[in-house]
Image: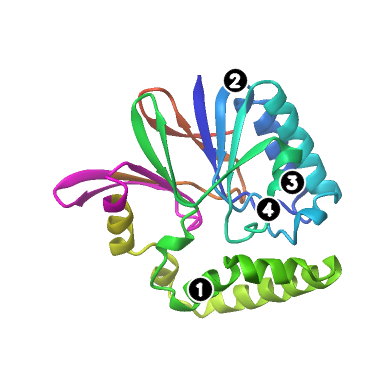
Amino acid sequence: METLFISDLHLSEERPDLLAQFLAFVEGPARDAAALYILGDLFEYWAGDDDGDAPLPRQVAQALAAAQGRGLAIHFMAGNRDFLIGPDYARQAGMTLLPDPSVVELDGQRLLLLHGDSLCTDDVAYQTYRTQVRNPAYQAQFLAQPLAARRAFIEQIRQKSEAAKRDKAEEIMDVNAGAVADVLRQHDFPILIHGHTHRPAHHRLDVDGRTCERWVLSDWRDSAPYLAWTGTGLEYRELR
């Protein structure tokens, strides 16, 4: 059976079409798979697990839990939009939480999984922000605030982020080649899979005389693309 990889769906109430595609994906390609890896930004934002009772996240959790009940192993790695997803929602959705990065082995092949934002080291301002919000003490303080206040704060951050992107050079928001090489060295040169950059591609690169592979997952703006491990290799696919 195959293993599937997705990221950057950015599900939200504003895009019911993406939710419909996701539900079709869970009932379609994922039904026949052994495992599903969600590498971050499943949701456009996440204010805390107490927000999981809202209609959209509840519907997502119900679909995933049903798939898990049929035998699909579901693994979730936090993205830069939904890093506050915690054990309560993961339990509700039948997901296992994965640290970033994680190495998994499929049919004898080692795969290194990341969301991808940690590789964008040229964006110094973002990396400073990432370090702050991934701090457990910061998260505990933030989650102690009322849900309405957390939602309002996240909306402010989203607006500032979109404004900042317009002023940044495109290359700053892509991965840094040195950061990619470093993470491959640290994990003994596995195949690298990540999302975040919204630049799907299969890269072959030389690191210390070794030919390495980097597969970049696509976001779900107008279609529902995913990556499949077939047992012998990886291939891009799209929900039909």
According to the picture, the residue beneath numbered tag 4 turns out to be 85
Seen from the viewer's position, the closer of residues 226 and 120 is 120
Using the image, tell me which numbered label, if any, was put on residue 32. Answer: 2
Residue 128: x and y in percent read 50, 76
Seen from the viewer's position, the closer of residues 223 and 217 is 217
The reply to whether callout 3 and callout 4 are in contact (CB within 8 Å) is yes
In the orientation shown, which residue stands out farthest toward the left?
209
Q: Give the secondary structure at mark 2.
A: helix
Using the image, tell me which numbered label, if any, was put on residue 126. Answer: 1
How many badges with numbers are in the image?
A: 4
* Residue stretch rendered in magenta on the structure: 185-212
Q: Residue at x 30, y 50 (%)?
A: 184
Say whether disc 3 or disc 1 marks the residue closer to the N-terminus. Answer: 3
Report how far apart the C-alphas of labels 2 and 4 lie in the structure: 26 Å
Say whether disc 4 or disc 1 marks the residue closer to the N-terminus. Answer: 4
Packing grade of label 2 (10 A; few <14, some 14-19, many >=20) is: some
Mark 1 or 2: in front is 1
Residue 179: x and y in percent read 33, 62
- What is the quadrant of residue 113 in the picture? top left
Using the image, tell me which numbered label, if any, was put on residue 89. Answer: 3
Mark 3 or 1: in front is 3
Q: Give the secondary structure at mark 1.
A: helix
Position of 32 with respect to 181 (left or right) is right
Report how far apart the C-alphas of labels 3 and 2 lie in the structure: 24 Å
Say whether disc 3 or disc 2 marks the residue closer to the N-terminus. Answer: 2
